[in-house]
Amino acid sequence: MMKFETLLALFGDQVIFDFTSVLVLCGESRESTRVALHRMKKAGKIIELKRGLYAFAAPYRRVPLNAAALANLLYAPSYLSERWALSWYGVIPEKTAIYTSVTTRPTRSFENAMGVFQYRTIQTTLFGPYRTDTIMGQQVSIAPPEKALFDLWYLEHGEWTQARMEAYRFEPRAVDTAALRALIAASDLPRLARAMRVWEDYAREAAQGVII
């Protein structure tokens, strides 16, 4: 049966590895490989990120791994957006424990030792733009503040009234209003156009100190 040292030698320089690759490179039977990985997981040497996808546990990890970078790898194509990105940029004050991303694939969520990861479907024409930022020492695909706000407005149902924006405690100074306006104009979505008009009033009142 496959030994942990063999697995580490084969995949120790990779951020993540999958069952199929282990099966091919280790030359064991499917059942033997499954049992070996299960035992390593129980021993705390590897963690299962989702079915058939693994990473080495922290004491054995040679390649850095953080949850923000993992969010991109778990379910591709995707980029961090909505609440997590807005929190990261300081557009909303609350820290969120859920790594929120958008994808062109079906909506999914995963929970593992690294955290909770949520992916919501957005139509292909609205996927992106996103950028690559260094987060906790790793390269991560993430929406800029304006696209993160756009994605939230698009994916959450209902009208975006001023009261709703106040409830989120959005920080307008962290958002480029002109860039947001351009994104929404390009989308040609009436509900988001209405949200944009509300946002401009909200941002103006926030600048005047009317909204605290």
Image (cartoon, grey):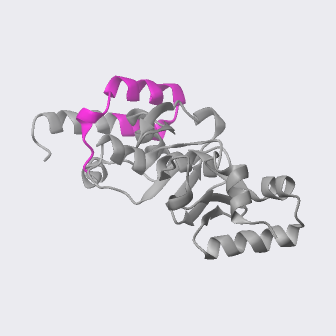
> Is the residue 176 above or below the residue 206 in the image?
above
**Range covered by the magenta-colored residues:** 169-196
Observer-nearest of 51 and 38: 38
Observer-nearest of 140 and 10: 10
Please name the residue shown 13% across and 47% down the image: 212
> Is the residue 83 above or below the residue 191 in the image?
below
Asked if residue 60 lies left or right of residue 211, the reply is: right
Asked if residue 177 lies left or right of residue 182, the reply is: left
Residue 57: quadrant of the picture = bottom right
Observer-nearest of 133 and 151: 133
Residue lying at the far front of the rendered structure: 5
Number of numbered markers: 0
Residue 179 magenta-drawn?
yes
Image coordinates of residue 107 in percent, x first then y, are: 63, 56
Magenta part, dominant SS: helix
Image coordinates of residue 128 in percent, x first then y, are: 55, 33
Asked if residue 25 lies left or right of residue 113, the reply is: right
Image coordinates of residue 154 in percent, x first then y, are: 49, 44
Observer-nearest of 126 and 132: 132
- Residue 179 shows in this picture: yes
> Is the residue 107 above or below the residue 146 in the image?
below
Residue 126: quadrant of the picture = top right
Residue 17 magenta-drawn?
no
Please name the residue shown 65% across and 37% down the image: 124
- Residue 201 shows in this picture: no
Residue lying at the far left of the rendered structure: 209
Please name the residue shown 32% across and 55% down the image: 95
Please name the residue shown 31% across and 39% down the image: 198
Image coordinates of residue 78 in percent, x first then y, are: 59, 43
Asked if residue 134 lies left or right of residue 187, the reply is: left
Q: Quadrant of the N terminus?
A: bottom right
Residue 146: quadrant of the picture = top left
